[in-house]
Image (cartoon, rainbow, N blue to C red):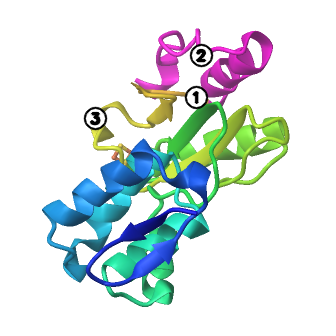
C-alpha cells in the first residue's frame, strides 16, 4: 500500500487514491511551503482536483499542514464554496446575497426545494442535481442571479430557474441555461 510523504508526517492512503489528484494537491502544499496559513488556498486546490472534500483528503491536508483535523473540517464546513459530499451531475447555486434576496432569491430557492424535494445543500437521490446557495456571486447588477452548472444567469424568476432545472431532469443536460431571460417585472 502506498504512502505519501510530507514534512508533517507519513500517512497511508488507499492505492486508488494515490493518483494525479494527490499529485496536484502535493504541488499546492509545496508551493505554499506547508504553511498552516495556506489552508483555504489548499482546500480550494483540493476541491478543484477531487471535486469535493472527502474525509481522507481533509485528514491528509491536516497532517501536511500540521493542523488539527477539527480546524480543517471547521473551515471546510464553514464556507459554502466547499463541498464535503460529491455533488450532482448538475449544480444549481442560488445567490442569497442582499441584492438577490431583495429581488426574490428566497422564492427561487423555495420553488426549487419544492420541485426537487430536497433542501439546499442536498443532491437528488439519483445524483443528478445539487442545490446550493451562495452569499454573493459578484453579479449584483443582474440580481437575482443563479449559477446553472458553470453559467451565471441573471434576472431570474422561480419559473425560469425551475424550467432550466427541469430541462436537466428531462434531457440530462443543461441545454436551457442560456434561455430564461428576465421577466418584465424583474427589470
Ligand atoms: S447579491 Fe447576488 S450576485 Fe451579489
The residue at 65%/55% (across/down) is 121
Mark earlier in primary sequence (3, 1): 3
The location of residue 82, given as percent across then percent down, is 47, 58
The part of the image, by quadrant, that contains residue 33 is: bottom left
Is residue 123 toward the left or the right of residue 140 in the image? right
Label 2 environment density (alpha carbons within 10 Å; few <14, some 14–19, many ≥20): many
**Quadrant where the C terminus lies?**
top left
81 up-or-down from 113: above or below: below
Q: Which residues are magenta?
A: 158-187
Residue 19 position, x and y percent, is 46, 46
Residue 164 in magenta stretch = yes
Q: Nearer the viewer, residue 172 or 15?
A: 15
Image point 62% across, 44% down: which residue?
87
Seen in the image, is 156 located left or right of residue 119?
left
Q: Quadrant of residue 56?
A: bottom right
Considering only order in the chain, which callout, 3 or 2, is on the residue closer to the N terminus?
A: 3
Is residue 78 in view?
no
Q: CA distance from mark 3 to mark 1?
A: 15 Å
Which comes sooner in the sequence, label 1 or label 2? 1
Residue linked to disc 3:
141
SS class, disc 1: loop
Amino acid at each position: 500500500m502506498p504512502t505519501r510523504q510530507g514534512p508533517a508526517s507519513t500517512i497511508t492512503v488507499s492505492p486508488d487514491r494515490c493518483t494525479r489528484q494527490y499529485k496536484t494537491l502535493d504541488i499546492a502544499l509545496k508551493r505554499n511551503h506547508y504553511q498552516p496559513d495556506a489552508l483555504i488556498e489548499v482546500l480550494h486546490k483540493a476541491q478543484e482536483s477531487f471535486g469535493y472534500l472527502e474525509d481522507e483528503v481533509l485528514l491528509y491536508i491536516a497532517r501536511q499542514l500540521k493542523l488539527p483535523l477539527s480546524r480543517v473540517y471547521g473551515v471546510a464546513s464553514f464556507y459554502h464554496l466547499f463541498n464535503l459530499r460529491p455533488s450532482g451531475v448538475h449544480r444549481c447555486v442560488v445567490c442569497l446575497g442582499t441584492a438577490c434576496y431583495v429581488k426574490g432569491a428566497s422564492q427561487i430557492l423555495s420553488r426549487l426545494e419544492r420541485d426537487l424535494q430536497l433542501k439546499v445543500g442536498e443532491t437528488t437521490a439519483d445524483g443528478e442535481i445539487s442545490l446550493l446557495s451562495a452569499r454573493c456571486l459578484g453579479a449584483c447588477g443582474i440580481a437575482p442571479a443563479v449559477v446553472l452548472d458553470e453559467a451565471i444567469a441573471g434576472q431570474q424568476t422561480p419559473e425560469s430557474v425551475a424550467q432550466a432545472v427541469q430541462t436537466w431532469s428531462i434531457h440530462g443536460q443543461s441545454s436551457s441555461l442560456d434561455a430564461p431571460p428576465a421577466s418584465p417585472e424583474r427589470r
